[in-house]
Amino acid sequence: MSVTVSMTVNGKAVSGNVEPRTLLVQFLRDHLRLTGTHVGCDTSQCGACVVHLDGVSVKSCTMLTVQAEGAAVTTIEGLAQGDRLHPMQEAFRENHGLQCGFCTPGMVMSAIDLVRDNPEITEDEIRKGIDGNLCRCTGYHNIVKSIKAGAAAMKG
Amino acid sequence: MYEFDHRRPGTLADALDALRAADDGTVLAGGQTLLPTLKQRLASPSDLIDLSGIAELQGIAIDGDAVVIGAMTRHADVAASSEVQQKIPALAALAGDIGDRQVRNRGTLGGSVANNDPAADYPAACLALGATIKTSAREIAADDFFTGLFETALEDDEVVTAVRFPAPDKAAYMKFKNPASRYAIVGVFVARTADGVRVAVTGAGDGGVFRVPEMESALAANFTPSALEGIAVPPDDLNSDIHASAEYRAHLVGVMARRAVAACG
Ligand SMILES: Cc1cc2nc3c(=O)[nH]c(=O)nc-3n(C[C@H](O)[C@H](O)[C@H](O)COP(=O)(O)OP(=O)(O)OC[C@H]3O[C@@H](n4cnc5c(N)ncnc54)[C@H](O)[C@@H]3O)c2cc1C
Ligand code: FES
Ligand code: FES
């Protein structure tokens, strides 16, 4: 049995018919074709699926679409303004904060939430703050560097 | 995931009616344990009764010398609460170290205590602080609430509404984390109150969270880490898994307990 859901995604009002068991990430990827949000595990541990829900980071694989009824969701596709990348995206590009890029959307979404909460964030706080995001490629060094640079750029 | 119906009642009374009316209803709080369980098809409820629309289950209030926290209060809100930071800083710190940032933005106090995962953090705080679990039907002392592995005193169709934590003189929680899941391999919560000292251990026990009376009486006489020298928890009733043997966990209980007492200052 399907139900109707309505929410705001990347600033636009959207609605759709989903089964109650449809995960938010499935709604974003399969119904809205916003495939920037990834699925890297089925144990809620990797963070590839992180989006913002009413301004805070959540794992869209560990939420039902119906739980986002009426909410404002931002995905990686909603960050850039036209051709201009968000300062955090730009910082990942500049600092080689990605290799294969699979974890990157989730990393960037987590990083922005983290920095909004703590603009003067230290390297230690960054390392601890992204412990819900796993990367199989980079060894994290350049991710941490990117977030540090992104934090500085977001202030300016 | 198997199919289910989803309902989001606006009051506790409606939630209880929906639970009773359902064939096999389950309440949904933050979903950070329930949804992974459903994804693995380890459960197949007919109805999920979503508690997120019920205002009376939210929020943090000071009640005399205690802090009362609504069941649907998220870990991130407990960690950030100035009331909790002021009255029971060890509890705010514990909440701020559960899982990761995204889990803390969804997971709730009520879900954690109702689930009673043997490696969860809140059960240790409830037991050591002598908390009272308030439900839709009654009030249950933490000592009587956590009854075994993923088992609690909750009846079918009984919902946790809030937890009342009396403020201690001093308290601290030390957790040795599993680096992958961030759950406790061993966590020890030590609290000193007017009524004495309570020591609760999570992550280690075969039957979930437990108290250590020998440590409590030693600390009541002398509240210093050295008072715990020579007190060992026997490994017989402790977990052994790929992460740690029972002997290693027994050792960690002593280490974490001494560190927690030291952290009490
Ligand atoms: C990656 C990851 C890491 C984690 N790390 C930790 C950790 O380090 N420490 C830790 O303690 N926890 C950890 N957790 C678990 C997390 O804290 C969960 O949020 C918590 O266990 C369950 O809370 P919830 O609100 O998400 O409940 P849900 O998942 O919604 O519900 C859990 C269970 O409790 C029942 N329930 C929920 N609310 C109530 C209520 N009010 N009354 C009666 N029954 C209820 C549900 O029916 C269900 O059976 C982790 C989870 C994940 C995914
Ligand atoms: S897909 Fe791995 S945490 Fe969501
Ligand atoms: S860049 Fe490949 S997983 Fe992180």
Image: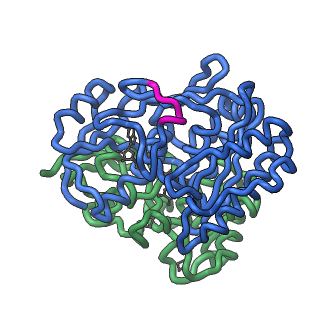
Chain colours: A green, B blue
- Answer left or right for B257 relative to A61: right
Point out the image quarter for the C terminus of chain A: bottom right
Q: Quadrant of residue A75?
A: bottom left
Percent coordinates x, y for residue A154 in the rendering: 66, 56
Residue placed most toward the observer, A99 or B24? B24
Q: Quadrant of residue B90?
A: top right
Percent coordinates x, y for residue B146 in the rendering: 48, 42
- Answer left or right for B127 relative to B199: left
Q: Residue at x 16, y 42 (%)?
A: B23
Q: Is residue B151 above or below residue A111?
A: above
- Answer left or right for A73 relative to B254: left
Q: Residue at x 47, y 60 (%)?
A: A50
Question: How many marks overall?
Answer: 0
Percent coordinates x, y for residue B29 in the rendering: 39, 42
Residue placed most toward the observer, B64 or A55? B64
Does B140 appear in magenta? yes
Q: Is residue A93 above or below residue B14?
A: below
Task: Kindly give the residue lying farthest to the left in the view shown.
Answer: A1
Q: Quadrant of residue B51?
A: top left
Does B107 appear in magenta? no
- Answer left or right for A151 relative to A134: right
Q: Residue at x 56, y 56 (%)?
A: B205
Q: Is residue B240 visible?
A: yes
Percent coordinates x, y for residue B88 in the rendering: 69, 33
Q: Is residue A130 visible?
A: no
Q: Residue at x 71, y 70 (%)?
A: A145
Residue placed most toward the observer, A9 or A44? A44
User: What range of the chain is rendered magenta?
Assistant: B139-144
Task: Kindly give the residue lying farthest to the top in the view shown.
Answer: B64
